[in-house]
Image (cartoon, rainbow, N blue to C red):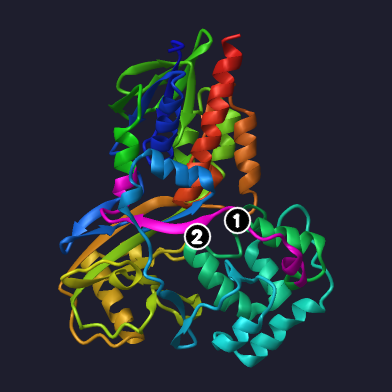
């Protein structure tokens, strides 16, 4: 043991993974400081006798490093893979299978799958096909995904496909989402080629192994295993208010004072901005530029047989053009191999330009989801139980300028303070795990250099 101490602030999936990886390295002691509960947005509830997710419901595992992590935690045997049912889009008044060959809504190399899907009209398809003949789209440094989609493929394509797929996943309007940050392959194709379609045909295929997984006991299996197996780690319940210097080390100030040689801040940027203000006003100002939106997950249970779920359909995203409050819906027992005494659906509400739902009571939101679901598929009975989980100002928006805000914050932080988490490396558990791994490498390098 080197005698070094690292404070990890926040025990969402990034903080838990950071503590685990640092402990595994064995080069320091870790103080894992959390104000609420471990797990963050991983929140597995017991609902209708089965584990149901109130946050993300799966992990897109990318790369051998993340597969190795699951093996190291000894939870491989708990892995559950999707049934193979496919998602749909509710557009033009009908559920339609999501076309193959799309990257967050952008064509991977052909619009033929779009033609077969019927998601957009014939005039819309004709306009989308002009990408192959239009001059190169010129832009400086970055461009929003929505603007790029509209300029290359037309307004209907942008509103029906990109706003639905990309906006639904990011809980944001595509007119603000950074192409450079969220869609680097599309960004490179638009930057280097006249046509995005032709450019994507020349793009290299992903080489890393990839798989979507969950666990039979829910995603809490992962968060619990990370905490349980974190060596040299002390878990502390406290709310950090400030980080200060102290003769070459750092003082983390909450209800108690904690001394650390390095600090990894794994909280949302809004919280990080506040706690870092006294040590770097410039870093705090950059972090304050990162925006957040609110979303809610609505769980509804029905008697088995009450819903006419289309065969092979795991759920659907809702086009904003349909005018519904619901943004998406997952049929839990269709997507995952779960046998339940009741049918459970997960509905989602909330985009950065839609806050009307926040004024409604939980019961009103549940009833609204039931009515809208009934307008999309045949629902023969009322739901039996419901749960509404609100995530207020918890979803980071990776807007144009996001990369500059993160880079500016990191450049203005004192050596020894690091940022990791969804606010900085992107949403999704896989991105958080990758961010944790990167932060751990930086911490170990810093501790090694400071010891010399």
Mark 2: which secondary structure? Answer: helix
Relative to the observer, which residue lies in front, 114 or 415? 114
Q: Residue at x 64, y 36 (%)?
A: 408
Would you say residue 142 is visible in this rendering?
A: yes
Q: Residue at x 64, y 92 (%)?
A: 122
Q: Are marks 1 and 2 in contact (CB under 8 Å)?
A: yes
| Residue 60 percent across, percent down from the top left | 47, 56
In the rendered structure, find residue 359 and report the number of the disc placed on it: none
**Gap between marks 1 and 2 measured at Cα:** 9 Å
- Residue lying furthest right: 135
Instruction: Give the class, few, some or many, for how many residues have Cα within 10 Å of label 1's Cα (few <14, many ≥20).
Output: many
Q: Quadrant of residue 131?
A: bottom right
Report the magenta residues as a range.
198-222
Relative to the observer, which residue lies in front, 137 or 19? 19
Q: Quadrant of residue 29?
A: top left
Q: Residue at x 51, y 7 (%)?
A: 247
Q: Is residue 212 left or right of residue 403?
A: left
Mark 1: which secondary structure? Answer: helix
What residue did someone put label 1 on? 182
Relative to the observer, which residue lies in front, 134 or 143? 134
| Residue 326 percent across, percent down from the top left | 38, 72
Would you say residue 432 is visible in this rendering?
A: no
Q: Residue at x 61, y 64 (%)?
A: 175
- Asked if the stretch drawn in magenta spans residue 204, the answer is yes
What residue did someone put label 2 on? 170
| Residue 101 percent across, percent down from the top left | 60, 73
- Asked if the stretch drawn in magenta spans residue 48, the answer is no
Q: Quadrant of the N terminus?
A: top left
Q: Is residue 15 above or below residue 22?
A: below
- Total count of labels: 2
| Residue 297 percent across, percent down from the top left | 32, 62
Specify which label sits upstream in the sequence, 1 or 2: 2
């Amino acid at each position: 043991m080197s005698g070094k101490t690292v404070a990890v602030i926040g025990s969402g999936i990034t903080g838990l993974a950071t503590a685990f990886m640092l402990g595994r390295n064995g080069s320091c002691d870790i103080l894992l400081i959390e104000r609420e509960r471990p797990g963050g947005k991983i929140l597995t509830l017991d609902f209708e006798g089965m584990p149901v997710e109130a946050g993300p419901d799966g992990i897109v595992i990318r790369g051998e490093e993340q597969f190795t992590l699951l093996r190291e935690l000894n939870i491989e045997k708990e892995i559950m893979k999707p049934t193979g049912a496919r998602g749909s889009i509710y557009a033009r008044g009908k559920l339609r299978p999501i076309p193959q060959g799309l990257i967050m809504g952008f064509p991977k190399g052909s619009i033929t799958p779009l033609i077969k899907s019927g998601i957009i009209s014939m005039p819309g398809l004709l306009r989308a096909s002009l990408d192959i003949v239009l001059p190169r789209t010129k832009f400086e440094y970055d461009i929003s995904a929505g603007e790029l989609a509209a300029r290359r493929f037309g307004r209907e394509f942008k509103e029906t496909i990109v706003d639905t797929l990309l906006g639904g996943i990011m809980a944001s309007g595509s007119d603000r989402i950074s192409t450079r940050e969220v869609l680097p392959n599309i960004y490179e194709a638009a930057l280097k080629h006249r046509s995005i379609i032709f450019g994507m045909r020349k793009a290299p295929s992903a080489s890393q192994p990839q798989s979507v997984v969950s666990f039979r006991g829910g995603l809490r299996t992962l968060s619990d295993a990370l905490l349980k197996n974190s060596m040299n780690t002390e878990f502390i319940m406290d709310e950090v208010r400030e980080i200060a210097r102290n003769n070459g080390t750092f003082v983390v100030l909450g209800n108690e004072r904690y001394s650390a040689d390095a600090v990894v801040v794994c909280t949302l940027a809004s919280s990080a901005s506040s706690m870092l203000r006294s040590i770097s006003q410039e870093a705090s100002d950059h972090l304050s530029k990162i925006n957040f939106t609110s979303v809610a997950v609505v769980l509804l249970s029905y008697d088995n047989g009450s819903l006419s779920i289309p065969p092979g359909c795991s759920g659907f995203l809702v086009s904003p053009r349909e005018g519904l409050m619901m943004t998406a819906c997952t049929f839990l027992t269709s997507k995952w191999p779960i046998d339940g005494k009741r049918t459970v659906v997960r509905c989602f509400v909330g985009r950065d330009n839609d806050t009307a739902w926040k004024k409604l009571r939980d019961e009103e939101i549940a009833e609204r989801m039931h009515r809208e679901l009934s307008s999309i598929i045949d629902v023969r009975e009322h739901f039996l139980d419901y749960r509404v989980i609100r995530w207020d100002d918890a979803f980071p928006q990776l807007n144009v300028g996001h990369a500059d805000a993160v880079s500016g914050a990191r450049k203005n932080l004192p050596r020894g303070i690091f940022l990791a988490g969804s606010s900085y490396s992107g949403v999704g558990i896989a991105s958080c795990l990758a961010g944790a791994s990167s932060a751990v490498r930086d911490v170990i390098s810093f501790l090694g250099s400071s010891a010399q």
